[in-house]
Image (cartoon, rainbow, N blue to C red):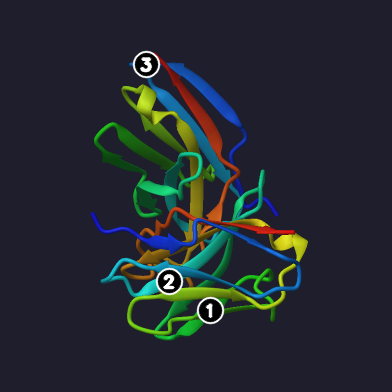
Amino acid sequence: DQQVKQNSPSLSVQEGRISILNCDYTNSMFDYFLWYKKYPAEGPTFLISISSIKDKNEDGRFTVFLNKSAKHLSLHIVPSQPGDSAVYFCAASAGWGSGGSNYKLTFGKGTLLTVNP
Amino acid sequence: EPEVTQTPSHQVTQMGQEVILRCVPISNHLYFYWYRQILGQKVEFLVSFYNNEISEKSEIFDDQFSVERPDGSNFTLKIRSTKLEDSAMYFCASSVRENTEAFFGQGTRLTVV
């Protein structure tokens, strides 16, 4: 049951360049999307989120883009830094806009980002 | 910065034993969650808890599992009779409201032998 898919298990970029992490979803009820970063032996750390009423949300070096018609979102990190090296998880939930059940996050498998100095 | 704290960081238990995983959510948060990640697999939702009752639970959260908020600060996950397949990282999370981001603890690695 892969409702949230991150098709690239890994990505390697040079320091200073842009990192683009992609995520696709199949459940049309999802209306709230989040990106988490995870270092080994730590819990996921919240990075940025976007609701379905927007198509872009920016926070410092991190920007998330949402394409609802394609059921696709992406996380851009500019410029990438070695400290950004981690596993990035895309997550989604349903019911944000309607006050329905929004308690459950469905995660993708994650993408390991390596930023080389 | 406020954070979700979990204890212990690692728990080893024998199959069939009961374990209790403990969490202290962020103090002004009202919604509490348990997730788990089996090695090499996705982070999976187990249960959500609000106003002293379960809001939603997954198929994984069967009768072997229970959650409790015994006082104003702790949130616990109990596994009554552990199985080998319960071995995983268990993450506690909390959020201010139901439609905001959840903040995760550092996890408890449960190893069932």
Q: Chain for mark 2?
A: B
Residue placed under numbered mark 2 in the picture = B32
Query: Between residues A97 and B69, which one lies in front from this camera angle?
Result: B69
Q: Secondary structure at mark 3?
A: loop
Q: Secondary structure at mark 2?
A: strand
Residue placed under numbered mark 3 in the picture = A15
Q: Residue at x 36, y 66 (%)?
A: B95
Q: Residues within 10 Å of mark 1 (few under 14, many from 20)?
A: many
In the rendered view of the protein, which quadrant contains the C terminus of chain B?
bottom right
Query: Given this view, does label 3 or label 1 mark the residue nearer the observer?
Result: 1
In 3D space, how far apart are the residues under numbered discs 2 and 3 (Cα atoms)? Answer: 37 Å
Establish whether labels 2 and 3 are both on one chain. no
Q: Chain for mark 1?
A: B
Establish whether labels 3 and 1 are both on one chain. no
Query: Between residues A29 and B39, which one lies in front from this camera angle?
Result: B39
Q: Which label was assigned to residue B67?
A: 1
Q: Residue at x 68, y 71 (%)?
A: B59
**Residue B74 horizontal/vertical position (percent):** 39, 75
Whether tag 2 and tag 1 are in contact, CB under 8 A, the answer is yes
Whether tag 3 and tag 1 are in contact, CB under 8 A, the answer is no
Q: Quadrant of residue A66?
A: top left
How many discs mark residues in the rendered view? 3
A69 on left or right of B65: left
Q: Chain for mark 3?
A: A
Q: Residues within 10 Å of mark 3 (few under 14, many from 20)?
A: some
